[in-house]
Image: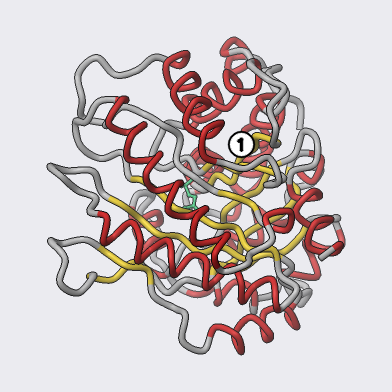
């Protein structure tokens, strides 16, 4: 348990957060489509190498979540990616859920799969260098949904995953993501996120998961992306903190938010506003995919000659999010040059 607790604390160390680079085959293809690059194994490898070898970014990045293909790949010089990360003091992690699939007998809701055979997969991933893992469950807000059925089945699966991780000496990142598609109000987002977190922590407790060796990766409480009168940065920070204070035990070392389709600047501003209202019982940090990678992906465009520009863009986002860890970010910094 001491090791799990230490790893969890290291992942939310001061000024640091996590890079989510664990896009599944389908998701990375979507990202590459947006820059007109073919999703071949070599292109995926080259893109991930660009991110992982960015010089100096380890000042802001504590861990990287990898995908099954990525944890087995190597840098151009033959160094396995987990070794490359470890050599910079960055902790390798692994996505282990097998995606959200239709939930039987539900009204179009989903359940994340991947529990069968998970004990053996975790053992293998630990051998490959993983010290933490991620399992994502998703919930859609629409009409009366999400249902209690979807909320509790996903919470149960998240806790089964978390218990198996801890048995294997791997810190589970528990990711219940309430999606922000739709036109719902911020209050609705608050109520749904509250119900989801209530179920998740009940299941974690019932399944004897030790919270000190766990991290939570949730959505922020936002207005639906298509709604009118969307909440301001202050509203988001107030509703999100109110929700988490009520539902996340202080034994959890850190909350590492996902960006979930927010613009990169919004994701940074929201995290910053929450940290300005600290101190909090837990570290408030980031585990961003899109919000850390979007400018880098665009700058790269699949071309070797753009690697340096892409690394600069990634470094810059990492640095700004690091500033948001202590409430030290200001939107004006977006326009200043960040020396890499
Ligand atoms: P986003 O920050 O792009 O939402 O990705 C984080 C993640 O890992 C989602 O599972």
| Residue 262, image quadrant | top left
Depth check: 101 or 107 in front?
107
Q: Position of residue 117 (x, y in %)?
A: 51, 89
Q: Nearer the viewer, residue 60 or 189?
A: 189
Please identify the quadrant where the C terminus is shown.
Answer: top right
Residue 280: quadrant of the picture: top right
**Residue 156 appears left or right of 16:** left
Crowding at mark 1 (Cα within 10 Å: few <14, some 14-19, many 20+)? many
Asked whether 300 or 151 is in front, the reply is 151
| Count of all numbered marks drawn on residues in the image | 1
Q: Is residue 114 left or right of residue 54?
A: left
Residue in the image at 31% along x and 25% along y: 186
Locate residue 5 relative to residue 52 in the image: left or right.
right
- Residue at 37% x, 68% y is 112
Q: Quadrant of residue 120?
A: bottom right
Q: Position of residue 268 (x, y in %)?
A: 56, 27
Q: How is the image coloured?
A: secondary structure
Which is more toward the observer, 164 or 232? 164
Q: What residue would you read off at disc 1?
A: 313
User: Where is the N terminus found, in terms of image quarters?
Assistant: bottom right
Residue 32 locus on image (x, y percent)? 40, 57
Name the residue at 28% across, 71% down: 101
The structure residue drawn at horizontal position 52% and vertical position 33%, both measured from the top left corner, is 246
Q: In the orientation shown, which residue stands out farthest toward the front?
A: 206
* SS of the residue under disc 1: helix
């Amino acid at each position: 348990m001491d090791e799990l607790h230490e790893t969890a604390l290291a992942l939310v160390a001061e000024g640091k957060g996590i890079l989510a680079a664990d896009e599944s085959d389908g998701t990375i293809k979507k990202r590459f489509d947006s820059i007109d690059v073919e999703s071949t194994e070599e292109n995926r490898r080259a893109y991930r190498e660009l991110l992982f070898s960015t010089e100096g970014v380890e000042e802001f990045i504590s861990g990287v979540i990898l995908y099954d293909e990525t944890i087995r790949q190597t840098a151009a010089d033959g160094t396995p990616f987990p070794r490359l990360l470890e050599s910079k003091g960055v902790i390798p992690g692994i996505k282990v859920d097998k995606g959200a699939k239709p939930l039987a007998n539900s009204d179009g809701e989903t359940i994340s799969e991947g529990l069968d055979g998970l004990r053996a997969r975790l053992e293998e991933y630990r051998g490959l260098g993983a010290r933490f893992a991620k399992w994502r469950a998703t919930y859609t807000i629409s009409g009366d949904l999400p249902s209690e059925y979807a909320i509790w089945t996903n919470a149960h699966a998240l806790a089964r995953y978390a218990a198996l991780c801890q048995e294997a000496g791997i810190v589970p990142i528990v990711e219940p993501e309430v999606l922000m598609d739709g036109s719902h109000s911020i209050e609705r987002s608050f109520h749904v996120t509250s119900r989801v977190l209530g179920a998740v922590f009940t299941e974690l407790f019932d399944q004897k998961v030790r919270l000190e060796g766990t991290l939570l990766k949730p959505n922020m409480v936002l207005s639906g992306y298509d709604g009118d009168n969307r909440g301001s940065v202050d509203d988001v920070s107030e509703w999100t903190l109110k929700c988490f204070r009520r539902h996340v035990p202080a034994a959890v070392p850190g909350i590492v938010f996902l960006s979930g389709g927010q613009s990169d600047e919004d994701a940074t501003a929201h995290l910053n506003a929450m940290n300005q209202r600290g101190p909090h019982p837990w570290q408030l940090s980031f585990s961003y995919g899109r919000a850390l990678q979007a400018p880098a992906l665009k700058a790269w465009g699949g071309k070797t000659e753009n690697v340096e520009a892409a690394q600069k863009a990634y470094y810059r986002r990492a640095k700004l999010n690091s500033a948001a860890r202590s409430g030290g970010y200001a939107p004006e910094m977006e326009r200043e040059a960040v020396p890499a």
